[in-house]
Every structure is written in C-alpha cells, then in structure tokens.
C-alpha cells in the first residue's frame, strides 16, 4: 500500500492528482466542520452580487451568499455522493462479478445478462429513470450512480476472476482443503485489488461528473444545500453581471474530475505492466 | 463466427430485459397513474370517469397483461399516448429525434475530425513538446463535463464577441442545411468536446502500438515515405480501437444530449426525456427511455459486427 502511494507520488501526473484530491478532501472537511470563511447559507443582502474581494474571495451570489463557502460545502456534498456511490457500486459489482465467475454456467449467464441490460442504458438516462421513480435528492443520487456503475465493476472483476480460477494455485488451494470462502477472499479477491483500484479511481471521476450533471439539471442535490452543478446552472442567467459565479464552480468541477482522472491514469501505469511504456 | 452468432442471439434477450426493466420501473412509481397524470383535477372526476380513463390507458388490467399488451404494441410502433402532448408517444419522439440524431452525428464528426489527427500527431512526435501539449490538452478535455464547456462557450460568445448562440430554434436540415448546421455547431462542439479528448488519447496510444509492429518496420525498410507509413500502413489498424470507442460513445452522446439540449434550449429528444420526467408523463418517459436504449443497443451491435469485419483475427476466430 505505502509502496503504491510512493510510486504514485513519483509519477508526474499521479503527484498532481494526489495533490488535488488531498486539497479537495481538506476543503470538504473544513466545510463539514463549519470552518468556511462565512456561513454558507447566510445571506449578506447588502453585499449582493459583489465581485471577488478581500472579504469574499470568490464574490457573492444573487442572495448575498459567499461563493467560496458554498463551493467548500458543494465539494463536500459532491465527494460524499461520489465516494458513497462508488463504494456501493464496487461492493455490489465485485460480489456479482466474483460469483458469476466462480459459479459459472447458468449463474454466470443470468448475472452477466442482467448487467448487460443495465449497460444498455446511457448512464445519465438510467440515472434519470431512477430519479423519476424515487424523486430527486442526495440519497437518490447515490443510489442512481451506484446502480449505473455496478455492471462496470461486475465486468472488471469477472474477467480476471475467470482466468484466476483456472490457475494452478487455486487448484492447489483446493487440494489443501481450503474453504471456498478462503479461496474467494484470499486467492481471487486479493489478486483483483490492482484492477479494482484503477477502476475505483476512474469511477470516482465519473461519479463526480454525473453528480454535477444531475444537479445541473436540477435533479440531484436539492437547494438550499450547495452543490457545484446547481451553482453552475444558476450562474447562467447572471454570467454577464457576475462571471465569478460561473467561473469558480466551473473550475472547481473540472479540477476535481481532473484530480481523479490523473490519479487513475497514474495508478494504471503503475499497476498494469502492459501499459507501462505508454499513456502517462 | 461463433462470436457473431452469440451476439445476435443475446440481442433480443437483452432487449426483452430492457423492456421489462423500463416497464417495471415506471410501475414502481408511488401513487396511481391517473392522479399523477391529472394532478388536482383528478379529484374532480366521478368514479365512472376514473374507471373509463383507467380502461382507456389499459391500467385496469393486471400488471402482466398490461406488460404483454404494451410489449406487443411495441412491434406495431404503439408506445402509448403522451399525456402532456395528447399525441401518440412515437409521434412525439419522431418529431424530436432528428435534432438529437443530427446533434450526435455532428458531435461525432467533430470529435473524430479533431481527435484522430491530434492523436496521430502526438504518436509520431512521441515524448516531444508537441506530444506533451496534446496529452495535457486531452487530459483537461476529458475532465471537462459538457455542461461546463457549454456554459463557458455561451459566456465567451456573449461577452467577448457580443453574439448569442441561436437558442431554442432549430431548422431541419432538409429545409435549410446551412442554417441547420450553423444552429447546431456550438451545441455539437459542447457535446463532442470530451469525446474528442478520449479519441485523441485512444488514437495516440493505439498508433504508438501499431508503429512498433513488425509490418510497419517492413514498410519503412522497403522505403515507404514516413507520411505513407503513418497514414496508409499504420492508421487503418490503429483506428480499430477508435471504432469500438465511437460505438460506445455514440450511445453516450444520445444520453449526453439531455444536458446539452438543456443548456442551449434545443427541442430534441433529451429535452423531451427531461420534460417527461419533470412533468410526470410516464408513457412518455417509458417510450423515450426505451427508444434511446434501443438505439444504443443497435449501434453497439453494429459496431461489434463492424469490428469483426475490420479485424480478420476475430473474424477467423483465432483469438
């Protein structure tokens, strides 16, 4: 683990990525602890739509709320949804993929065809369908994004699990009388950590993007909870008078996704020897 | 060949699964459909009117018979009746689809037109400054969501050029091709931006792979010019992963159109899905989602078949 972190830090894009993720987690934590420059929901009516200044580093919005404080809470909200949804997707996808590969035959066919059905929908559309059923909100966003990414994890796990299952060390473990549970967790799962780690990091980037997209459409995080997508959507009508309301949320979304993408790419370089020469 | 046969056999199965999933999810929505459809007006109906309406929409039947009726209707192009437009769902979809299709195709042309040359350029100038610039740009592009790019494009156009991109209007390409292409240009750039970045990355890495192949070295040894080696010998093989990516991405473009059409206020299929969801027109939600998923599946099937045709190694089953 520390070895991988060391290698990531040595990798040029890995270092930038880790730095961005660290910065975002710090900002999110400060936001959660209430250590924002101003209370994020407080309306300073006298300072409505003021540009960036010493007191409001990133300006204020139409209701006189401090953009930077709202961004900090927005990052926290995005991170919460991204991490929670990817955690669920990883868990569900790994279990499904592992069992499909291990049990094989009919189970494999049924489980993977079910995953194919979910993959037949463009991600945002499947998320919208789920939101149509449950109604928008934080919990719905987590569920929707988790369901959208579960089949991807199932596929990522099933392929390598199938080939691991054929390997001699698994047969050997069986001959020694290891239990199925031991073989699955020790021999299969442990060997799947590398491809999973890459996928998890890249999925976090996608989850951030999807969450911001859903909030942008007004179907994700509901106001008054600050969210990056919604802040960007609301800035559209004011971009002439108050461009800071658009530029800072836009940059915040981009940079966050970039951080996870860079880390994911670096991780793939480090963990997958086949691509070591290329894609940096 | 077995791969193609397997693919063709599972296709209807997945389609059936998709239709069940869409149907069941709509039935999971809490509350009864008539109240959802009419809102407060539902309270003013007599029980007889309510029953008549339920019979009209077929929702007085048990669920499995509703499903079989709906499913059989699909083969006759009957997707039900939209409650907000008071028109058959298929008619509404077909009115909106040309815009979304044109938008997605334009986005794809832009993405491939920009991405492939940039990727090839970067690969032939491996590790030199121009390669690094392209790689950094591609990474940034891949991390920029369409709604960020869309809002930035509108901002730059309106503040620095004093122009407002044509919003909310759409001329069909059959009526006035130039006006139509012009109206959809910026939306298509918005939609194709991140896709162009991934095309660049994929074509770069696949070009690098191909350039180190033996047959490319042979072509060089036989005295083929560097340009001809890259474009005639290497490019066709390097494009195979790009084709696969394009197929998958095309479906995402259809989905991504939801956001882009919202930003530019375009009356396409994406906006229709969104309106159907926010106004709780369930027949329309069901129909549009199924329609997009169906297109997505068909495109992916075609790409898989094209892939087989392009790559003799798969066609001959030696892989």
Image: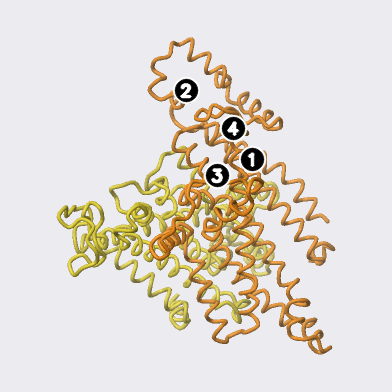
From this view, report whether residue B200 is shown above or below residue A141.
Answer: below
Where is the C terminus of chain A found, in terms of image quarters? bottom right
Residue on which the image places disc 2: B34
Residue on which the image places disc 3: B268
Per the rendering, the mark at residue A267 is none
Chain identifier of the residue bearing label 3 in the image: B
**N-terminal-most mark, 2 or 1:** 1
Q: Answer yes or no: are tags 1 and 4 on the same subunit.
A: yes
Residue on which the image places disc 4: B89
Q: Say which residue appears at 77% left-offset and 82% top-offset.
A: B216
Query: Which callout, 2 or 1, points to the residue nearer the camera?
Result: 2
Q: Decide if residue A150 is on the left or right side of residue B210.
A: left
Residue on which the image places disc 1: B17
Observer able to see residue A208: no
From this view, report whether residue B44 is shown above or below residue A203.
Answer: above
Q: Answer yes or no: are tags 1 and 3 on the same subunit.
A: yes
Query: Which callout, 2 or 3, points to the residue nearer the camera?
Result: 3
Q: Nearer the viewer, residue B10 or A126?
A: A126
Residue B43 placement: quadrant: top left
Chain identifier of the residue bearing label 2 in the image: B
């Amino acid at each position: 683990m520390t070895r991988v972190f060391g290698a990531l830090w040595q990798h040029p894009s890995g270092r930038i990525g880790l730095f961005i993720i660290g910065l975002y987690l710090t900002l999110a934590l400060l936001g959660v602890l209430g250590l924002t420059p101003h209370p994020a929901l407080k309306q300073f009516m006298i300072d409505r739509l003021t540009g960036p200044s010493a007191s409001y580093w990133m300006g204020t919005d139409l209701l006189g709320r401090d953009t930077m404080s709202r961004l900090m809470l927005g990052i926290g909200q995005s991170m919460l949804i991204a991490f929670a949804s990817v955690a669920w997707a990883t868990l569900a996808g790994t279990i499904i993929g592992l069992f499909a590969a291990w049990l094989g035959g009919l189970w494999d066919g049924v489980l993977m065809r079910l995953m194919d059905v979910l993959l037949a929908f463009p991600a945002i559309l499947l998320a919208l369908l789920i939101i149509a059923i449950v109604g928008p909100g934080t919990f719905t966003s987590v569920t929707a994004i988790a369901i959208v990414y579960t089949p991807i994890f199932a596929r990522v796990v099933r392929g390598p699990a199938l080939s691991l299952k054929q390997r001699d060390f698994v047969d050997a473990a069986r001959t020694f009388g290891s239990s199925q549970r031991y073989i699955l967790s020790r021999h299969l799962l442990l060997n799947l950590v590398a491809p999973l780690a890459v996928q998890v990091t890249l999925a976090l980037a996608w989850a951030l993007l999807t969450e911001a997209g859903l909030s942008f459409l007004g179907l994700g995080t509901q106001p008054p909870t600050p969210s990056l997508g919604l802040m960007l959507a609301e800035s559209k009508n004011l971009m002439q008078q108050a461009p800071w309301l658009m530029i800072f949320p836009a940059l915040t979304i981009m940079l966050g996704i970039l951080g996870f993408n860079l880390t994911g790419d670096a991780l793939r370089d480090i963990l997958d020897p086949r691509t070591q020469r290329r894609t940096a | 060949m077995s791969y193609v046969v397997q693919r063709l056999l599972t296709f209807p199965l997945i389609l059936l699964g998709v239709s069940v999933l869409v149907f069941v999810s709509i039935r999971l929505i809490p509350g009864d459909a008539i109240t959802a459809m009419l809102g407060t007006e539902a309270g003013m109906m007599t029980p007889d009117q309510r029953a008549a309406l339920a019979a009209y929409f077929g929702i007085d039947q048990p669920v499995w018979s509703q499903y079989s009726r709906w499913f059989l209707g699909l083969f006759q192009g009957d997707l039900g009746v939209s409650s907000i437009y008071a028109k058959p769902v298929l008619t509404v979809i077909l009115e909106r689809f040309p815009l979304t299709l044109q938008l997605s195709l334009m986005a794809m042309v832009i993405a491939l037109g920009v991405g492939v040359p940039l990727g090839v350029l970067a690969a032939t100038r491996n590790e030199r400054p121009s390669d690094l610039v392209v790689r950094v740009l591609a990474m940034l592009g891949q991390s920029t969501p369409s709604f960020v790019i869309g809002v930035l494009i509108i901002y730059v156009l309106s503040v620095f050029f004093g122009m407002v991109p044509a919003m909310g209007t759409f001329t069909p390409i059959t009526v006035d091709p130039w006006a139509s292409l012009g109206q959809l240009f910026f939306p298509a750039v918005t939609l194709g931006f991140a896709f162009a970045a991934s095309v660049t990355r994929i074509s770069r890495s696949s070009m690098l792979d191909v350039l180190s192949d033996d047959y490319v070295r042979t072509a060089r040894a036989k005295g083929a010019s560097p340009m001809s080696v890259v474009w005639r010998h290497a490019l066709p093989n390097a494009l195979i992963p790009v084709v696969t990516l394009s197929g998958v991405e095309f479906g995402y473009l259809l989905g991504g159109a939801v956001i882009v059409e919202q930003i530019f206020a375009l009356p396409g299929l994406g906006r229709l899905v969104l309106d159907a969801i926010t106004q709780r027109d369930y027949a329309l939600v069901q129909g549009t989602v199924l329609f997009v998923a169906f297109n997505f599946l068909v495109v992916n099937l075609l790409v898989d078949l094209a892939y087989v045709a392009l790559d003799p190694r798969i066609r001959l089953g030696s892989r």
